[in-house]
Image (spheres, rainbow, N blue to C red):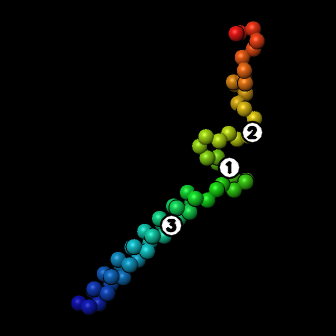
Amino acid sequence: MKQMVNLYLLGMVLTLLSVFVRVMESLESLLESPAPGNSWNPRGQLTGPESPRGLPDHPPRGMR
């Protein structure tokens, strides 16, 4: 009976440890900034400093 309790406690400890490790990995991926050569960009950032080409900065003078 004592051996079953020990195995049960060992399983609980391992389960809690794996949950803790996954939470820490998730927090680490949320907190770290993307590397300079990374292929993905965070939401709301453009791929380059230039403005999108489809929209002009200001309308032409004749359209006012």
Residue beneath label 3, please? 24
Q: Secondary structure at mark 3?
A: helix
Amino acid on which the number 2 mark rests in the picture: Pro
Sequence-earlier tag: 3 or 2: 3
In this rendering, would 52 be left or right of 44? right
Q: Quadrant of residue 8?
A: bottom left
Q: Can you tell which of label 1 and label 2 is closer to the viewer?
A: 2
Sequence-earlier tag: 3 or 1: 3
Residue at figure coordinates x 48%, y 70% from the top left = 21
Comparing 63 with 28, the one in front is: 63
Disc 2: CA contacts within 10 A as few (<14), some (14-19) or many (>=20): few
Residue 50 in the image: above or below residue 27: above
Residue 39's tag is 1
Q: Position of residue 16 (x, y in %)?
A: 39, 73
Which quadrant is the C terminus positioned in?
Answer: top right
Alpha carbon of mark 3 to alpha carbon of mark 2: how far? 33 Å
Q: Secondary structure at mark 1?
A: loop
